[in-house]
Image: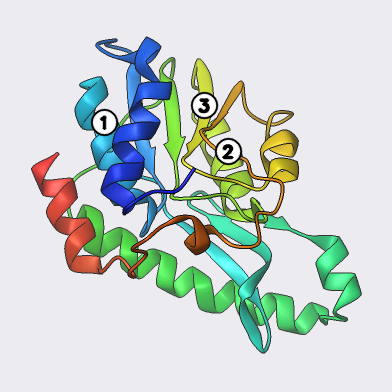
């Protein structure tokens, strides 16, 4: 399954989540930045509130697109020890990446949310949305962060994801909705006709519209 853009992906993902439409206890959380346009469409079609959950990938030194882990709001850190071991990433490099991304996480939290407090999650069904699931490190960190708020259920939702990642996340979330999980996944962007980088300005605009 291919998508024209993130908006198209969000609308099609929303059809997979139709049973959660018009429920008072449902909230949609987007993983910025690319997950926000997808989640905006999901929240709009489900008639659910939209917020963001700040998560930052920890890129391998010299290969920033390859995740060796991720951090999320609330001091959560998830590490991929297999990748760290295979690529001989030192503990010092892991800590440096964590500190660097922590600064960026805090900056984006202030930029996106401003004075608006986070949406309460206790006792609610939380739908975590990203534009795709590759290694799943950022989504795993997001799940752990949301668990701290005692939600009733956590649902992971993405338009496309690596089959093994979608399967692994099923052990961590209450439900995983991967609209498409191709055998030869390779990269998220390959499943979109248009996969431009989402800007901070676009994120802020969509959150304000929601």
- Between 39 and 53, which is closer to the camera in this rendering? 39
Q: Is residue 36 above or below residue 149?
A: below
1 and 3 marks in contact (CB < 8 Å): no
How many C-alpha atoms fall within 10 Å of the one at disc 2: few (<14), some, or many (≥20)? many
Query: For residue 29, which quarter of the picture?
Result: top left
Q: Earlier in the sequence, mark 1 or mark 3?
A: 1
Q: Is residue 207 above or below residue 135?
A: above
Q: Is residue 125 above or below residue 106?
A: above
| 3D distance between C-alphas at marks 3 and 2 | 9 Å
How many C-alpha atoms fall within 10 Å of the one at disc 1: few (<14), some, or many (≥20)? many
Query: For residue 210, which quarter of the picture?
Result: top left
Q: Residue at x 49, y 42 (%)?
A: 1
Q: Residue at x 75, y 38 (%)?
A: 168
Side of 72 where 30 appears, left or right: left
| 3D distance between C-alphas at marks 1 and 2 | 18 Å
Q: Is residue 167 above or below residue 209?
A: above
* The disc label shown at residue 155, or none: 3
In the rendered image, the residue lying farthest to the left is 209
Q: Earlier in the sequence, mark 3 or mark 2?
A: 2
Residue 118 visible, this angle: no
Query: For residue 9, which quarter of the picture?
Result: top left
Side of 55 where 43 appears, left or right: left
- In the rendered image, which residue does mark 1 sit on? 43
1 and 2 marks in contact (CB < 8 Å): no
| 3D distance between C-alphas at marks 1 and 3 | 13 Å
Q: Circle 3 sits in a helix, a strand or a loop, which is it?
A: strand
């Amino acid at each position: 399954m291919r998508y024209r853009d993130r908006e198209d992906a969000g609308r099609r993902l929303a059809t997979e989540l139709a049973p959660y439409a018009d429920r008072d206890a449902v909230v949609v959380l987007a993983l910025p930045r690319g997950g926000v346009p997808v989640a905006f469409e999901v929240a709009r079609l489900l008639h659910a509130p939209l917020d963001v959950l700040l998560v930052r990938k920890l890129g391998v030194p010299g290969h920033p697109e390859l995740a060796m882990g991720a951090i999320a709001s609330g001091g959560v850190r998830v590490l991929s020890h297999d990748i760290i071991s295979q690529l001989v990433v030192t503990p010092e490099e892991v800590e440096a990446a964590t500190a660097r991304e922590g600064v960026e996480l805090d900056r984006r939290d202030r930029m996106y949310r401003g004075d608006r407090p986070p949406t309460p999650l206790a006792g609610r069904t939380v739908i975590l949305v990203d534009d795709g699931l590759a290694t799943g490190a950022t989504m795993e960190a997001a799940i752990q962060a949301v668990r701290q708020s005692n939600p009733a259920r956590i649902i992971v939702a993405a338009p496309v994801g690596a089959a093994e990642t979608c399967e692994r996340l099923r052990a961590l979330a209450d439900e995983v909705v991967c609209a498409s999980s191709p055998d030869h996944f390779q990269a998220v962007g390959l499943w979109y006709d248009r996969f431009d980088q989402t800007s901070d300005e676009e994120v802020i605009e969509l959150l304000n519209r929601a």
